[in-house]
Image (cartoon, coloured by chain):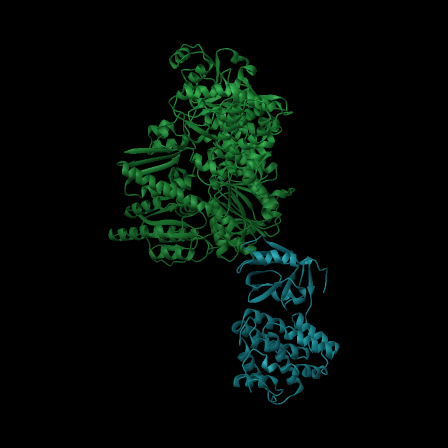
Amino acid sequence: MHGEPWQGWMTASLHDHLGVRATGHVHSIFRQSFNIDVDGLLLNVGQHRQRLSPLGMALDPTEFGPLWETVAIGDLVRWSARKLAIYPSRGTPVVIPWERTATVDHAVPYGAMNPEILAGFAESIQALSLDTKIGLTWDADLQRVVGQLRRADADESERQSAFRWLLGRGKGLTPSGDDIVAGYAFLLWMFGIAVIDARLRDEARQRTTATSATLLHMLSFGETGQALFDVWRAANEGSLQNLDHSLKRVLEIGHTSGADTVFGIGLGVERLLGAGNRPKAGGGE
Amino acid sequence: MLKTVIRQNSYQDSINLMLLTNALNALDVVNRASVMMGTEANKDIFKSTGFYTDEVGTAAPADMVIVLDVEGDDAQASALATVDSFLADLSSRRKKGGTVDVTSLAAAIEELPDANLALFSIPGEYAAPEMRKALEAGLSVFSFTDNVSIEDEIELKRYAHEHGLLMMGPDCGTGIISGIPLAFTNVVRPGNIGVVGASGTGIQEVTCIIDDQGEGVIHAIGTGGRDLSSDVDAITVKDALIALEHHDPTDVIVLISKPPAPAVRDEVVNLLHNLSKPVVAIFLGEKPDHHEQNVYLAHTLEEAALIAVDLANDREVQPVYMPALDNELDARIGESGTVKGLYSGGTLANEAGMLISEALDLGGVIHHDGYVLDANGYQVMDLGDDMYTQGRPHPMIDPEIRINMLKDLAADETTQIILLDCVLGYGAHPDMAGQLAPAIRSGLESAKAAGKDLYIIASVVGTRQDPQNYDAAVRTLREAGAYVEATNARAIRLALKLKGVDLVEAPKQVIEREVEKIDLPAPSDNVMDLLTTKPRVVNIGLESFNESITTFGGASVQYAWKPAAGGNKELIRLLNAFSGRDDIAAANQVVVDRMRESQPFLVDVVPAKSVIEILNTRTLLHAGPPITYPEMTGPMQGSCVGAILFEEWASDEAEARRMLEAGEIQFCPCHHVNAVGPMGGITSGNMPVVVVINRADDSVGYCIMNEGIGKVLRFGAYSDEVVNRLRWMRDVLGPVLSQALQQTENGINLNVLISRALTMGDEFHQRNIAGTLNLFKELMPLIVKLDIDQADKERVVQFLADTDQFFLNVMMATGKSIVEYARKYQEGTVVTTMTRNGKDFGIRIAGMGDEWFTAPVNTPNGLYFSGYSEEDANPDIGDSAITETIGVGAMIDVAAPAVTRFVGSGGGYDDALAVSEEMDTITISNNANWSVPNWNFKGTPLGIDITRVVETGITPLINTGIAHREAGVGQVGAGTVRAPLACFEKALVAYARKLGLS
């Protein structure tokens, strides 16, 4: 974090991704936050610094509450080098000077992780019995795709095919397939493999939800939300206990999103550990 | 045949009445109709439109005048049923509005204490003082109201400026404040553009284009069309620009102006250059060929909007903005074919006139008879011009005039292109496109049948958030055969293209400009509060304006305004003169305080002549203001006969009447000698009177005792039974009660008794049973102790037990003792006496001492005993209105709702409450000593103020018995009666004269 927390917090690289000047619109409104659409990327505005999205802002609850009550889908949002201004159709404009917004850096260093921690990942994830918790059905297609991702010797075209199959597959704001890709990309980024390239980012914008596309966009730069960032921190510290705890915290996200993400992390771990064909899985097999 | 119906004191705003007129004109049984308020201006319209009748001439400004051209009574009845139904519907819609209704600005502010804006849509002739009051109350003003003089506009704007307020208008049709559409306005997405506009439809066109481009407008501050004149000197434009400069969410400012005065334009443009934010300015009629630094000068409304959109997005401003037309037409019309514009929006008409004239070299825009262009057969009409809207709704509301003109122009040989606007948004017709479509379709068909090529080109001014469906409006017009363009400028370009002229704009470059640096003043806290919060609005006039306010997050309270003083301008002037007088307010407070701090005690019952000197002669007291015997109505004359027989001045009725007619008996109002008397109020020297002393200063009040019901003197009966009862009262009842009261140390404390009876359901005029019982409770232990004849004692007790209204007369003496104390302070506008003599209603006010102000008395409305009807009723009579004078009786019907039902003033509790609430609006204070449980323990209304009565037209309501108009018959019913307004008006004029205000 940099600067004095006063009115809120924001992703440190927000302007890198959304530009210094832009116009957006309120895209979606949830119970605790709302999303602003800027050219297909969603800036999530909430009120909890601890739940800051990979591309997000968190406002002081006293500021957020009245704003949340008056915004409506389609409302205009403008920002410039100096400020962010939200123009709720049923309220008065809220102007947030950037200078009063502290930054939160959730960028995971690329390729800087000690490979020895992989065993710790594998052990923790195996204990979670994720096969029965993920949001996709264990059918032949999923088995094929999983195989393609976890095999160290799979070629790139197979993996791209697997990604395409996964993107947008499943229910919810972040479909299960996207969460699996996200977990997979997160793990590999830490160990120096960039899974999500520009083409996959574009494909995500076409094939899945704007929320997922934003998540994958940010992950393509190694940027995460608080939960995955905590996983990185535990792994970086080499603390198996913290790693196990942080993975379990990820598991708590959404209905199956957490499980899907950790499942994806597990696939990345298996790929790096050079695992062969997947051992007999629980659930659908 | 013309039939005129005048509904007195029945105010409705002009738009409602225009719509009502339309509804009447649509009836088969009505040849034609016109409904307007009875103002002098409207009478002129009645004359000019052939609706004037003698009855119209008698109407007051607050009267609704309905003139019907109908055949027969049935047709008239049918039309009036439509009137009632229409007004009832307005009433029911009003109740669904969700805003609170009040009847004064003060009440509105009490209801909405943080109000920061007053929205006016009332007739211009009354508006300036009302707006001034709003400004003085610290509210900025948005005046949809037009027809305000330039002098008033200047004064109001100067006052607003000096006091840190915004004066938007007059004649400000459109505005957006913090995203809330006000008046006739579209629903535009909020965004980082702020607009200042001296043009209603100019603002609408620009903001709608901005919205269509995906951007938004946070404020559109209308200024009224004259703001940039040399007289007004752009007071509001400058204040608004400076406010937007300091409004952080506003990044781009747009200024829209009709052709300004050159010096004003220069000053404003220099101000624009001193702003830190980029500005787009359009001075309609100018054709700029460059931009000046951060001030971008537009030629058309569309160009202004598109430049603003680019600036709002931090995009570079383009040299030219000429978006492609939506319609590709290869056709060309011939040399003789002309263009006609039928516009509902004045600025849109101006834009059409300007562009067509520039393209075809027609000599420029004109302004006469509703035309903005009239050259070589090319005509553009502003159908919102006063010429077309006198006595009829604006063409944005009423399609009729355009439908008729479309028909005419379709048949016109040279007309080959018709331009139309279709304005959506709050205030506009709910389906103007649907209304115009059949006329468009039939016009095109008839032209085709006549072998003429006709093109109808329209633009729809609206957004997809408007209450009307923008896309449906466009579709409807297209399906009818019109070519629809997205903007007015493009519609005009398409029209010109059909004439073979491709309108092009020369590229504009940004040039440097020498700027005179000025120190920008800081906007006031009030103005910034207005621009940084959702407005809290006192809506004065059209109730429909509340809808957009509450829908978009603002708050509003409806001030159900009607012209003060029934629209009498001289009285309005006097009221305004009074309203600023602290000395009068202070004087009124003294009078009211005296009433409140009064300490009435019932101390004795004595022969009247023992305390009223004049009654030692052959004099009778009477109720009401002074009156002669011949002027008296039957009941009072009958009472006189009875009193003479009682006093044995004559031996029979004939002799008594002879004495009266011969002038042998003198008369004096009770009120002149500290007395009051019920009904006829006839009091002679030997009649016993109750004595009430106001211990606040020992003022005294006397009143004869209540005789019970049936044939009684006060209602004009004078039979032996009546006279004998009076003698018993003289010989037994009076002395017994006197002896009983002498046993008390100080008499009976009436404040305590009154307060207690109020909690038991008395209002002290029509219902006194609780007061009587409480008095009975006080007297009984005293009477039983008396060493008197047992038969006398029993008869006295029985009489008191039988006489429910016995306390009324005690209350009247109480009232007299209170007002006698109060009226010794002879300043102010508080009513100190109200009374009636069967001919006149008379009042006195503190500031005019003993002077009477009278007007013909009204006849009560009420319920009648079996066998009697209104025809039998005597006009209102009696001093008993002293009860209402001190704030009880009908003033406090809510304390005794059952009485409301009996006296026929409405029915249930709600009606009783409504009466008291209404009376509360014409009084200065409340008497906490007499609190009313049914009214949340609020005190009785205290201090009727003639200024409030005259201003509101609400006169005191009085509960009353109804006497038969013939002597001797007695009471035939009970009801309520209104004090006539005229006596209050006379008092106001007289007091104003005394103060040198006339």
| In-front residue for pair B490/A204 | A204
Residue displayed at 53% across by 60% down:
A73
* Residue B540 seen from this side: yes
Q: Colour of chain A?
A: cyan
In the picture, which quadrant includes the N terminus of chain B? top left
Query: Count the marks: how many?
Result: 0
Image spot of residue B253 (x, y percent): 56, 49
Specify the quadrant of the image occupied by residue A152.
bottom right
* Residue B370 seen from this side: no
| In-front residue for pair A134/A237 | A134
Image spot of residue B929 (x, y percent): 61, 33
| In-front residue for pair B235/B363 | B235
Q: Colour of chain B?
A: green
Image spot of residue A247 (x, y percent): 67, 76
Specify the quadrant of the image occupied by residue B724.
top left
| In-front residue for pair A275/B753 | B753
Image spot of residue B987 (x, y percent): 51, 23
Give left or right: position of A135 versus B81: right
Specify the quadrant of the image occupied by residue A81.
bottom right
Q: Residue furthest front?
A: B790
Above or below residue B132? Residue A175 is below
Residue displayed at 67% across by 86% down:
A273
